[in-house]
C-alpha cells in the first residue's frame, strides 16, 4: 500500500479507476492528478483555472472527467493527461460517466443536471442528424476543421 501526501490538505475527492490501475484526485490547488495504484507514483497532473471539485473515470478507464469552479467539465486521456473535450456551463460540481461511457452527466450549483455527448464523433453525428442538407466542404472546414469531410 502507499500514501499520497498533500501538504496543504486541499484534496476534495479521490476515485479508483474501474480497471484498478489508477487512482485520481481532485484538489483546491486547481489540479487533478492520476496516480499508479500499485505504487502511488504520480503519472500526470491536469490543470484547471479553478478549484477542481470532482473526478470520474470512464468505464473503460481510458478517460478521466473533471469538474471545476472554472465552469468547465473536461475529459482527459489516461494516462497521458491530454485534454480531449471541454464542456462549459455554470459552476460544475460533479461529473459521472454513463455505464457505456458515451455520455457525461454534470451537476451545478444552480441545481441543474446536464447530460452531454462528449466524443467528437458523437457530437458530429448529432449535428449532422439535425441538418436539412449536407455541409459544403468550406462549411465543414470552418466548423469542423480537424475532422475529415463527410457527406
Image: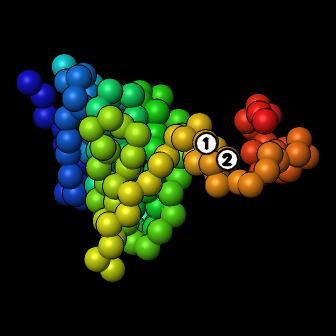
Q: Which residue is drawn at 63% across and 44% down?
A: 124
Placement of 95 over or under 15, stated as above or below: below
- Classify residue 12 as left or right of residue 49: left
> Is 40 left or right of 101, judged from the image as shown?
left
- Report the residue at 46% width, 39% height from top: 76
Instruction: Rate crowding at label 1 as few (under 14), some (14 to 19) or many (20 or more) other CA atoms within 10 Å.
Output: few
Q: Which mark is residue 17?
A: none
Please, which residue is most extreme toward the bottom here?
Answer: 110
**Which x, y percent locates residue 19?**
23, 23
Q: Do the residues labelled 2 and 1 touch (CB within 8 Å)?
A: yes
Picture disc at residue 128: 2
Residue 94 placement: quadrant: bottom left
The answer to which of 105 and 91 lies nearer the viewer is 105
Task: Report helix, strand or loop for mark 1.
Answer: helix
Which residue is outermost to the front? 132
Q: Where is residue 96 in the image (x, y as percent from the top left)?
A: 29, 49
**Alpha carbon of mark 2 to alpha carbon of mark 1: how far?**
5 Å
Q: Residue 148: x and y, percent? A: 76, 31
Q: Which residue: 29% across, 32% down? A: 59
Q: How is the image coloured?
A: rainbow
Disc 1 target residue: 125
Visible in this render: residue 30? no
Counting labels gives: 2
- Compare residues 127 and 49 and report the one nearer the observer: 127
Residue 89 in the image, given as x and y percentages of width and height: 47, 68
Q: In this view, does 58 lie above or below 71?
A: above
Q: In which quarter of the image is the C terminus?
A: top right
Q: Is 16 above or below relative to 20?
A: below
Residue 108, placed above or below residue 13: below
The quadrant in which residue 116 appears is: bottom left
Amino acid at each position: 500500500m502507499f500514501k499520497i501526501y498533500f501538504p496543504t490538505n486541499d484534496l476534495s475527492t479521490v476515485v479508483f479507476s474501474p480497471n484498478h490501475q489508477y487512482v485520481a484526485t481532485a484538489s483546491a490547488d486547481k489540479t487533478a492528478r492520476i496516480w499508479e495504484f500499485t505504487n502511488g507514483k504520480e503519472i500526470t497532473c491536469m490543470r484547471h483555472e479553478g478549484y477542481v471539485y470532482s473526478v470520474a473515470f470512464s468505464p473503460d478507464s481510458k478517460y478521466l472527467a473533471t469538474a471545476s469552479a472554472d465552469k468547465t467539465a473536461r475529459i482527459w486521456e489516461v494516462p497521458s493527461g491530454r485534454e480531449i473535450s471541454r464542456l462549459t456551463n455554470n459552476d460544475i460540481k460533479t461529473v459521472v460517466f454513463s455505464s457505456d461511457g458515451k455520455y457525461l452527466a454534470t451537476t451545478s450549483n444552480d441545481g441543474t443536471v446536464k447530460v452531454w455527448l462528449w466524443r467528437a464523433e458523437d457530437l458530429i453525428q448529432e449535428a449532422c442528424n439535425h441538418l436539412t442538407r449536407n455541409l459544403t466542404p468550406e462549411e465543414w472546414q470552418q466548423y469542423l476543421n480537424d475532422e475529415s469531410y463527410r457527406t
